Amino acid sequence: METDVEVAFSPFATRVTSWSIKASAITVSRLSYDGYDLPIAPPSKREDSVSVITQLADFRHHRLWRNGRLIFEGGHPKAAIAITDLREEWQCHHMSPFDNLRFNIPLVFIRNFLEELGRPQFEGFDCQPGTKDEVILGLAQAISPYLLNRKEPNQMFLEQISIVLLTHLAQTYGGQYFPTTKSGLLAPWQEKRALEFLTTMAFDQVSITKLAQTCGLSRSHFTRAFKLTFGKSPYRWLTEYRVAKAKELLLSDATILSVATKCGFSDQSHMTRIFQGITGKTPGKWRRENRPGARD
């Protein structure tokens, strides 16, 4: 764990009060300013991370650009959050006083966290602008005194903050399911064995009967327990896993046909039908929106 004060030399950064601290792989920063005369902030640096911003006080007015296009103008109340994908370029013009706290989270850290919990199909977060989130605000308020006093927090405290943050984000905005009851769930060893089987055989023909047998259960019992554990049937889990892997390959130069073949779909039209059913978009449209300049 390390603490440091953020230093930069742009006209924006030299006038904004900023502190930052590390919590596991997450960088936590608090930014504030009490004037109305800030210049436009420089464009953000592209990185394989997401930024979760919570407003510690009402923020009356700003303009926000994504990849050079103005997408928002207005304000946000206290407790409003924004989740931004830092693989894109962001730029903000703060036009009123503000006080916010930001969690910068590497995507690989999120994926590893979810894979350890048996939820490897992470596709990103979906959070509408201006959404108020008292949980995120509470976490920000808990860690803010350390930033203000520039004191080194207890490492266990920071670890707990990061676990609660990731769990809340994944369940609330990442489409992940975490059961609240243990009755009828797969045992930990069964869950581990089922996931190992599914991920190993994901792109081949998967026999649910054989999968159930590896867990020592009947097909019907296994299917019920799996759904209680993961919030979806084995077939749905497998389908979403294939689509998630297809998305990763669509960001490369691979053809859609080769992506379909590698991800266990019978042909391109089969992948298109399944992909569109889950995402609402064809693979080609998804690729164009997420990989500028890409061709089908």
Image (tube, grey):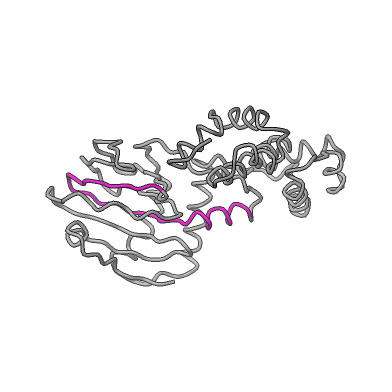
On screen, 277 above or below 216?
Answer: above
Residue at the image point whose x is 41% and y is 66% from the top: 22
Which range of residues does the magenta coloring cover?
A: 88-115
Residue 249 % position (x, y) = 59, 45
The residue closer to the viewer here, 118 or 134, is 118
Q: Residue at x 55, y 46 (%)?
A: 253
Viewport quadrant of the N terminus: bottom left
Measuring from the top left, give residue 99's x and y in whole percent.
25, 52
- Image coords of residue 240 (percent x, y): 64, 38
Residue 105 covered by magenta stretch: yes
Q: Is residue 108 left or right of residue 71?
A: right
Q: How many marks?
A: 0
In the image: residue 78, left or right of residue 238? left
Q: Position of residue 242 (x, y in %)?
A: 66, 41
Q: Nearest the camera: 287 or 218? A: 287
Q: Does the magenta-highlighted stretch encompass residue 223?
A: no
Front residue of this view, candidates 232 and 237:
237
Q: Is residue 21 left or right of residue 230?
A: left
Q: Within the image, what quadrant is residue 245 found in?
A: top right
Q: Is residue 55 above or below residue 154?
A: above
Q: Name the one closer to the observer, 9 or 288.
A: 288
Q: Residue at x 59, y 52 (%)?
A: 114
